[in-house]
Image: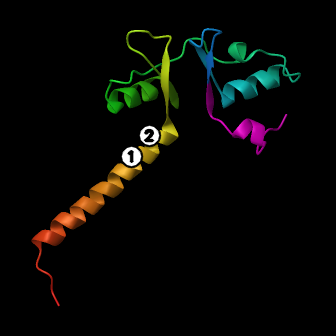
Amino acid sequence: MQFRGEPEVCRRQGTLLVDSQNRLAGIATRGDLLRALQRDPSGQTRALDAGSTQAITAHPDEPLQDAIARMLKHDVGRLPVVSRSDPGQVVGYLGRNGLMIARSRYHEEEEIREKSHWGDLLPIRP
């Protein structure tokens, strides 16, 4: 079974699964869904059964370094962000792509600040 390039499959890396009260029930990654479809090509497997009900999570008030370390430790590319006082309440989603974009922007801004700083200190030559 080949899914490479299929827009329905490739569009999303991971999806948070919530219960009827909109509380975190798990996470299903694209890999989880592909494995489920390989096991059951009819597509009758429930998303919750295909994914993981033991999602590794992050909290909105923790440093990004801690969340990144957790992603590396557990070899996951995305984390549901949940309330510290209510771990079932989803408040966000932190993915590898978003982290890379944020890191890239940070480095670009640092380069601009550094160039601006050195430009102010060095004499301009004709």
* Residue 35 badge: none
Label 1 sits on what residue type?
A: Arg
Are circles 2 and 1 on residues that touch, CB within 8 Å?
yes
Q: Identify the disc placed on residue 103.
A: 1
Question: Does the stretch in magenta take in 69?
Answer: no
Type of amino acid under label 2: Leu
User: Residue 90, position in %: x, y?
Assistant: 50, 19
Q: Nearer the viewer, residue 56 or 91?
A: 91
Which quarter of the picture shows residue 44?
Answer: top right
Say if 57 sits above or below 30 in the image: above
Q: Which picture quadrant has residue 100?
A: top left
Q: Residue at x 66, y 18 (%)?
A: 51
Which residue is painted at 52% across and 32% down in the image?
A: 77
The quarter in which the N terminus is drawn is top right
Q: Which residue is denoted by mark 2 in the rendering?
A: 99
The residue sitting at 48% across, 40% down in the picture is: 98
Judging depth in this view, the residue of 100 and 40 nearest the camera is 100
**Image position of 100 (left or right of 117):** right
Residue 85 visible, this angle: yes
